[in-house]
Image: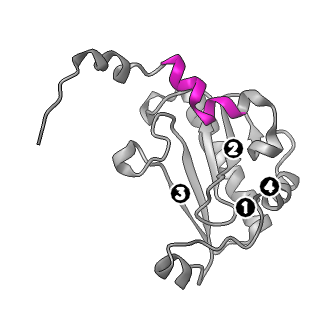
Amino acid sequence: MHILRAPWRMDYINSSNNDTQEQSCIFCVYPKEQNDAENLVLSRGEHVFAMLNRYPYSTGHVLIIPYRHTPLLESLTNEEKLEFMSITQIAIDVTKRTMKPDGFNLGINLGKVAGAGIDSHLHLHIVPRWNGDINFMSVTAEAKVLPEALSVTWEKMIASWPKNN
């Protein structure tokens, strides 16, 4: 194994507020665009927003995301934590009413090694689950079958989302 040393890169790696990272981060860009239907944004709070996952594990897969660009759960302020959980509860309630799942998986992947696709910006996954929803397609063909278009799911969920959140 070859070891390459590049000590000048540490400043960039340690920079949590790097402007380049924020400009290219969809979780920073989407809320600024004010194009909620196209960006699948469901709700905008003061500190946190909710959106459908564009590459869902299952239909109705929602993401809860702080506006502030941070990879660290422990860096959330008390206000951000409260709203993070409050919008999570609302998203679960809306999903129960519109999608009628049998259960949920909730998860935060902290870091690339933990499975985070976007590891520089904290986000929570809410994945609705149904009895019997694992099928041969994902096991044998490495494919997912999503029975509904994202735009249709977004329309259903936005119609059921409380108007004050």
Question: Spatial distance from mark 4 to mark 2, Cα to Cα?
Answer: 11 Å
- Left or right of 143, for residue 74: left
Q: What stretch is highlighted in magenta?
A: 18-30
Which amino acid lies under the numbered mark 1 shown in the image of this protein? Thr
Question: Spatial distance from mark 1 to mark 3, Cα to Cα?
Answer: 13 Å
Element under label 3? strand
Residue at 52% from the left image edge and 76% from the top image edge:
138
Marker disc for residue 162: none
Front-lying residue, 78 or 63: 63
Which amino acid lies under the numbered mark 4 shown in the image of this protein? Trp
Marker disc for residue 95: 1
Q: Mark 2 points at which residue?
A: 50
Q: Name the residue under label 3.
A: 106
Which amino acid lies under the numbered mark 3 shown in the image of this protein? Leu
Q: Name the residue under label 4.
A: 154
Residue 65 spot, x, y in % from top left: 60, 39
Residue found farthest to the left: 1
